[in-house]
Amino acid sequence: MWGKLKEAEERAKEAEGKAAEEQEAARKALDELEEVTWKVKGAEEEARREREKREKMAERLAQVEEEIAESLGGAGAAAGGKIAGQVGFKSAAGEQGGRGGGDSGGAAGGAVPAGFTLIEECAIEGMQRREAELLMQVDQHRVMLESKGAEVRKKEAEVRAKAREVTAKEEELKALRAKCQESGGLAAKEQEIKRLKEELLAKSEEIKRLERELSQKEEEARRKDMELIMKSAEARAKDEIIEEKERELQELREQLFSGASPRGGGTSRSMRYGGPSPRRKSDFEGEEGRGEGSFGEEGEEDTVESLREEIARMDGEMEELYQALIEAREEKEATVTELLKQVVTLNDRLAAAKREKDSAVAEAEKQLRDAVADAEERAEKARKEAESLAVVIEQTEGDKVHARASVEKAQEYLRALDIARVEVKRLRLERDLLNDRVNTLEEQARAAVNAGGALGRWLMPNCLLQRPEGSGSGGMGDAPDTPGR
């Protein structure tokens, strides 16, 4: 019974420990999920800010591109028109190059030696191509970041759903614990079992004490029995002595009434148990012929007197023996009666103690069975809860891994955006340099326009003989390698 009780207590403690461990694991998982959620939110916020910055950057780049195109196209068209008007020749290809913005001096390229060179036009075209590629990459990154943000939001929704499931499981577990506490709980069962165990131990100690008392009483009864046996033996010996005395007294009475005196034949029974006084011993003779004893008148009176004294003495002894025998029998009966009463009382107490012990054992076993069944049921529920929590935690771990991967990818995109931002800054610097270069070219174009008179007279024959062709569609003009002659 005690082994079953200990086993039930250990199983209950193990179930509570497992439930506590699962609850702690679920709490840790919730903390990690919350941390991942905050990280994802931070990443989304950072992505949103970067998206806004990228949009502003794209707008600014478009504006810069328009300003560059307008400045380059306007300057090329104005310079080409002025020069062609002064020399009396108007090139359609030059106008197309001026409007495209790439061929800033298509018509005047072959006419102005200090105009746009091929290297400068190639640099402008490369810058525009690089700017377009960067804008395309920024758009690609934006699309990818938006798709990843949608995935992250989806994962976040799934994680929140799992968190709600875990919270619901925790609420169910709390409700189960509250229900157990309302119904008394395992602690109350343990206290009740301990109390019953202590009562059972007290009953066992009481039974052992009663058994020891009973053993002592039995030992005392055996000792009393031995004393009674000894007294009974003494009483029987006294009865025999009394009977012997009665026979001797009867013989003496017969001798007294018959008046005969013993002769020869040795000593009588009365002599063996006291007999007459020594002074009367010479009145008797043995078989060896020590003389014949005879009773005279005086001797008869002495003999009668001695016999009467002997009879009185023996009567007193018999009375004492009878009195001692009666007292011994009464004491024996009283002792036996008292011992029987004590034995009956002890037997009743022992039977009552055994009944109480049996009832306490039965009640303890019943409560133990109930406690074991309750503990097994709670352990089974805790095991099922633990399994469900383990499944939820496993799914949560997978979601957490996916969320972490999404966060890492978002961080990669953010790093790519940082790289693009650095590249945009570099392009802005290049744009500023090109603006300075355009201003320088405009100054050179103005200088060329101011020298238009002499240059026109010198260029007229060459323009009639050789017409330069400017390339449109944003390209560079095909200026001749050397000024026309």
Image: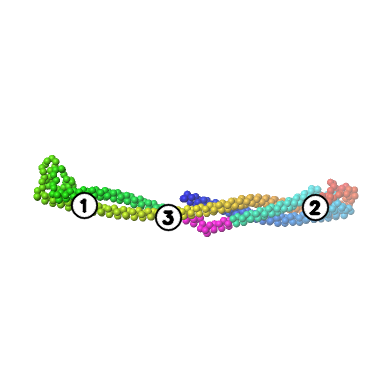
Q: Is residue 429 visible?
A: no
Report the disc number at residue 356. Answer: 3
Please, what secondary structure does the residue beneath circle 3 have? Answer: helix
Q: Are marks 1 and 3 in contact (CB under 8 Å)?
A: no
Hey, which quadrant is residue 40 in on the image?
bottom right
Q: How many numbered marks are there?
A: 3
Q: Nearer the viewer, residue 440 or 236?
A: 236
Q: Which residues are magenta?
A: 170-193
Q: Is residue 410 magenta?
A: no
Neighbour tally class for label 3: few under 14, some 14-19, many 20 plus, Cα within 10 Å: some
**x, y (%) of residue 172?**
58, 57
Q: Is residue 172 magenta?
A: yes
Please, what secondary structure does the residue beneath circle 2 have? Answer: helix
**x, y (%) of residue 46?**
67, 55
Q: What is the image's colouring?
A: rainbow
- Distance CA(mark 3)–CA(mark 2): 121 Å
- Identify residue type, mark 2: Leu
Horizontal side, residue 307 vs residue 239: left or right: left
Q: Nearer the viewer, residue 475 or 364?
A: 364
Q: Is residue 297 above or below residue 289?
A: below
Horizontal side, residue 322 vs residue 474: left or right: left
Q: Nearest to the eye among marks 3 and 2: give it.
A: 3
- Distance CA(mark 1)–CA(mark 3): 56 Å
Q: Are marks 1 and 2 in contact (CB under 8 Å)?
A: no
Report the disc number at residue 318. Answer: 1
Which residue, given by chain and number where applicable, does mark 2 sit on? 441
At 35% across and 50% down in the image, what residue appears? 215
Q: Which of disc 2 and disc 1 is earlier in sequence?
A: 1
Q: Is residue 416 visible?
A: yes
Q: Nearest to the eye among marks 1 and 3: give it.
A: 1
**x, y (%) of residue 105?**
83, 52
At 22% across and 52% down in the image, what residue appears? 321
